[in-house]
Image (cartoon, rainbow, N blue to C red):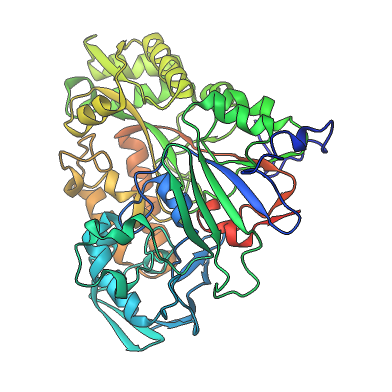
Amino acid sequence: MKRRDFIKVGAVVGGLSVLDLRSAKWAHAAQNKVLNIVVQPEPPGIQLGIYQNGPSQMIAGNIYDGLLRYDENLTPEPNLATSWEVSVDKLKYTFHLKEGVTWHDGEPFTAHDVVFSADDFLRQTHARHRTNMDAVESIEALDDHTVVFTLKNPVGPFMGIFEVGSMPMIPKHIYEGTEYRDNPANNHPIGTGPFKFKEWNKGSYIHLVRNDDYHEPELPYIDEVYFHVIPDAVSRAAAYESGRVDVLPGGSVEYFDLPRITELPDTEVTEKGWEFFSPLAWMWLNNRIPAFQDKRARQAAMYALDRQAMVDVVMQGYGKVATGPFHSSVLYHTDEGRQYEYNPDKARELLKESGYNGEKLTMIPLPYGEAWQRIAEMARQNLIDAGFNIELVATDLATRNQRIENWDFDISFTYLYQYGDAALGVSRNYISSAINKGSLYNNVEGYENPEVDRLFAEGAVEVDPEKRAAIYEEVQKILCEDVPIAWLFEMSFPTVYRSRVENIVNSAVGINDGLARTRMS
């Protein structure tokens, strides 16, 4: 089932558009544009250098800025940096900064803030940034508006690490010489972004207001934004239906509710805005246990799964069956590797050849709502039909996380972001050096293949696009043969919004940095 990126389903009728909108907090006054958005769950904090979970990024990405933005093709665009040059040997990246930019407290933003953010603050607080900086030898401010990153060796995806969630700019004058995680400013974040922090009413809403001194003078078009904390999925859907909120970000309502909600008058939906994250869902197979040590058993699992039915029935058509370890929006994706159509007979044949003895395997669902419970139930039945002995074991999120990070599982489910490039978000799940207990986001399945290690290492430092493509095509073919995990589908997180809200998604990270350019009619 395919869906258009934008589906306009009707005009304003009845009086639906004014329900609840006359109350003080939700009113759209003639001279004051107020946007109401759901945030789920409530973030632990919105100091973006410290908190990088999804809800934090969605809110704080509009308080802070990155040097660059990225379009849906992951092409870098100017933001705090207006232009840049890369040396012939790919070891020096020189960024020229926009002049006249100020922090929300009025202090000037300079290249010294960039050096402090990238070389000091974020190295201590931001795990993904720290990894991205492994190849950086030095970061130097040549003057107030010029900064140079010098690398130890070329890094193919280096130009892909400068968006606001990956490298937010942090004010040096506020944080230098302090305990970063304990700084009182964390409770009232100061950025250079289009919106200023106003208020956080815990358990209810986070309120941002327009930055009148934003470095793009005509932006933002909206005056105020409320991010509403509504813990229950049914209540979130009801808040949209009643007119209390204008935007339901991806993942904020159950998929089975989407057909009904998207049919409401004055409603549109887009699947855009996730290109940078490239979320891919899969089923972890513990390669350490006897049942999955033979790759034919893992191949059997792939043939056994009716992944198209999962997309069509459970995900309501939002998503696409995965062709392998790379999301299709990740650079150098190919579907040339071995493909696994739904074929129970082939699954039974391979499982018998693998020597599987019928041992009971525990399957742990992802406790993220009804859709994931149904995915687990479908997968369990598919695997049983192929000859596996599967027991479904429900857990809460904390227990599930603990079991997986300690490798105490046979089969489990997840989805992870791949950040548009294999070196940034794919290799960590397959290279042997990423087999580390205590983390959910690395090679928890225990897969080891020296050739795969070599190829990922070469791909990370290769700067020639054709050579990188060849390297990653080879690694995808190997992984599709070895099946270290069972890839399910490319995730789609549709954003639902009212027709009067225009241009809500305008970059590869969607709402996370897009509210400056959003209009309300």
Residue 127 percent coordinates (x, y): 26, 55
Front-most of residues 446 and 471: 446
The residue shown at (42%, 59%) is 469
Q: Measured from the top left, where is residue 118 in percent x and y?
A: 30, 70
Residue at the spot x=49%, y=62% of the render? 196
Asked which quadrant contains residue 361, the reply is top left
In this view, 90 is above or below 476: below
Q: Nearer the viewer, residue 210 or 139?
A: 210
155 left or right of 103? left
Q: Is residue 387 left or right of residue 25?
A: left
- Residue at left offset 32%, top offset 16%: 394
Q: Residue 66, image x and y in percent?
A: 44, 67
Q: Is residue 510 visible?
A: no
Answer whether residue 319 is visible to the viewer in this image.
Answer: yes
State the residue lying farthest toward the front.
24
Identity of the residue drawn at 35% across and 27% down:
299
Instruction: Indicate the quadrant containing the N terminus: top left, top right, bottom left or bottom right.
Output: top right
Q: Is residue 280 above or below residue 47?
A: above
The quarter of the picture where residue 287 lies is top left
Number of marks in the image? 0
Tell me: 325 left or right of 265: left
Q: Position of residue 209 (x, y in %)?
A: 55, 59
Q: Which sits in the foreground, 253 or 45?
A: 45
Q: Tell whether 125 sits left or right of 258.
A: left
Quadrant in the picture for residue 175: bottom left
